[in-house]
Amino acid sequence: MIRIVAAAGLAVGLALALLPGAGADDADAVLERARTATVREDFSGVVQIEWLADGEWRTAKAKVSGTGGTVQVGEGTRQAEGRGNDRWIAGVSGWQAGWDEPVSGEVPAPSAHWDLTLSRADSVAGRTAVVVTAVDRDSGTARLKVYCDKDTGVMLRREVLDRKGKVVRAVGFVEVKKLGGSRSAPPAVPDTTAAKTKSGEKVDPTPDEVVDLPKGFHAPDRIAGGFVLAGRYLREDETVQLYYTDGLFGFSVFQQRGDLDWAGLPRGGDGIVVDGADARGYEVAGGTVLVWDRDDTTRTLVSDAPMADLRAFAAAFDDGTRDHPGLVERITDFVLGPFGWR
Amino acid sequence: MNREPTMPDEDLLSAYLDGECTDLERAWVQEQLAASPEMRAVLAEVEAAREAVRSLPMRDAPPEFWAQILAPDATPDAAADAAPVDLAQHRRRRSPGRRVAALAGVAAAAVIAAVIMVPHEQRVTPPVATFTDAHALRSSLQDDAVSSLVPLAVQGGFRR
Amino acid sequence: MTDGVPTWEEVARDHGRFMYTVAYRLAGNDEDAQDLVQEALIRVRRGLERYEPGSLEGWLARIVTNVFLDEVRRRRRRPTDALPDDPERVLPPSPGADEVSTQLSDDIQAALAALPDEFRVPVVLCDVADQSYEQIAASLGIPVGTVRSRLHRGRRMLRTMLSEGAA
């Protein structure tokens, strides 16, 4: 099911959707509108990330703004910027290009795999909001809540819930200084510092989308649980990045040739088992991360979903890379059942 | 180059970043940060430097290094009783066949060498912080750009 | 391991890379780092008999640092072998690194190596070896306040060098 870009008349549709009985189509439309709202609207404020790690809540804040379709987050030597399909990251040595490939893969609509409801919400950062709640069809548990500004459709807050319905991660505005209104001209594109090889040649640090992967790497088109492969990328360090999505949660799988050097991993993290393989898991501001190796490749999985979901995805991915016709479907219930993920 | 602190108790900023302040000191720093753009600018500087060093990867010795350390024909007892080594003297005697006193028996040396000396191309260290950023960049194309990109602008990453 | 005390083999296997990384960040080049680690491992071998189970990597970082400082002191007594104190000195990237390395990582390492020893050591112990101020103070035999001050000044110098390099 291909996502359809919302039409301009959505504002009227949105008002109607707040009546009792607002259904999946309306919720889908709200989410679609939110996806592009920060490009359409100028805004500025402060966003906070909250995440649960080792049983404790951690938070981090950043200034954000949108000007003429350019989104800017952070300041000083820790910034990122996005315009169209281009992304840039600033470090201590200046700006570098981070991404320049469009989305070309099929993207499922959220309602294809989730039960969505749309309702009024308490205000977020002083803004009147509506909330889309995504419920797991099998367990009946809410797993995601997306709060959107009623006037502009801008996403104000995204809450990720675990299989018990408890919030484990959230990102959202804590202060809104400007939202909507007149648009300004976009700022100039960042002046980037080129990455170089040891011999001084410039290298392109942005990944390239590819159709065929190097030998030894696998890319199942679908992963049990409704995930569709939406991009295959080859990075300049010969790592493969696959991006999967179910319309609400995105998962990146990075593959490198060779066994995992455990001693090189960051400190901390938890020991996890993925279908019999040892793995290490981390909860950080940028998401949940799982690292393991199998079949001579080291795999790193990143998402903002909870760890149980990553563990199940990893097991399903590993199974999907093996030559077992029909096994993926049979193993779905076994792998995902204990976690109540679907 | 040797910049002296420009503000009283400016050193507290690094301690604040590292969580090495008392409660009173932390409260004082937070008060100063709220009131002083200069102080905030200095904090941003030291935070950038701190993160830069913390972002450096682990460093591997060349494979032959561990082979020399664990040379099978050296004796552990000789190593334990040897006088402290003058490294400058060591360097002047360096040669391809250079040995240093081994610190383990032959069997252990073989095991350790096999673990430590695994050829670089067979073991990989995933740059997890870079991968986390790359995921954020890709997600931002398809989902709300602000919430996807914000992790790139904050601390709260991996510990070295 | 016996009673929480590792064997030398376990130290080399599980922490050799950590020791080498600390040594490399202190010394700034692979040749000196190898010498530091060799000497440090000899001291570890001797010291294990007296080691009290606790922060093993803290203990190892202290040994590597002491070896580094001993070497620095020896070089100062021999002017012909002395390392220049010029903070503008920039070391080239060392051989053996990955085939493709970003300029960013090289710049940071070069700036770190260019710091005077008294500032580089606390920065490495804090931000590479992950030591607390108390551990750093114990390793260097200086008060915690001095650790705080040198660390802060080292970071500001580092930031200045990195900014000037990017300009």
Image (tube, grey):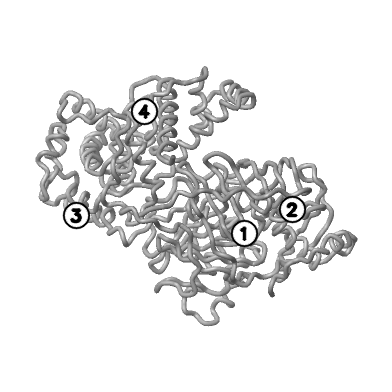
The residue shown at (42%, 26%) is: C153
Q: Do callouts 2 and 3 point to residues on the same chain?
A: no
Tell me the SS state at disc 1.
Answer: loop
According to the picture, the residue beneath numbered tag 1 turns out to be A84
> What amino acid is found at the position of numbered circle 3 in the picture?
Ala
Q: CA distance from mark 1 to mark 3?
A: 60 Å
Q: CA distance from mark 2 to mark 4?
A: 47 Å
Which of labels 2 and 3 is toward the front?
2
Q: Residues within 10 Å of mark 1 (few under 14, many from 20)?
A: few
* Residue B108, image x, y percentages: 22, 52
> What amino acid is found at the position of numbered circle 4 in the picture?
Phe
Q: Using the image, tell me which numbered label, if any, was put on residue A306.
A: none
Q: CA distance from mark 2 to mark 3?
A: 65 Å
According to the picture, the residue beneath numbered tag 2 turns out to be A154
According to the picture, the residue beneath numbered tag 3 turns out to be B107
Q: Is A275 placed above or below B146 here?
A: below
According to the picture, the residue beneath numbered tag 4 turns out to be C119
Chain under label 1?
Answer: A
Q: Do callouts 1 and 3 point to residues on the same chain?
A: no
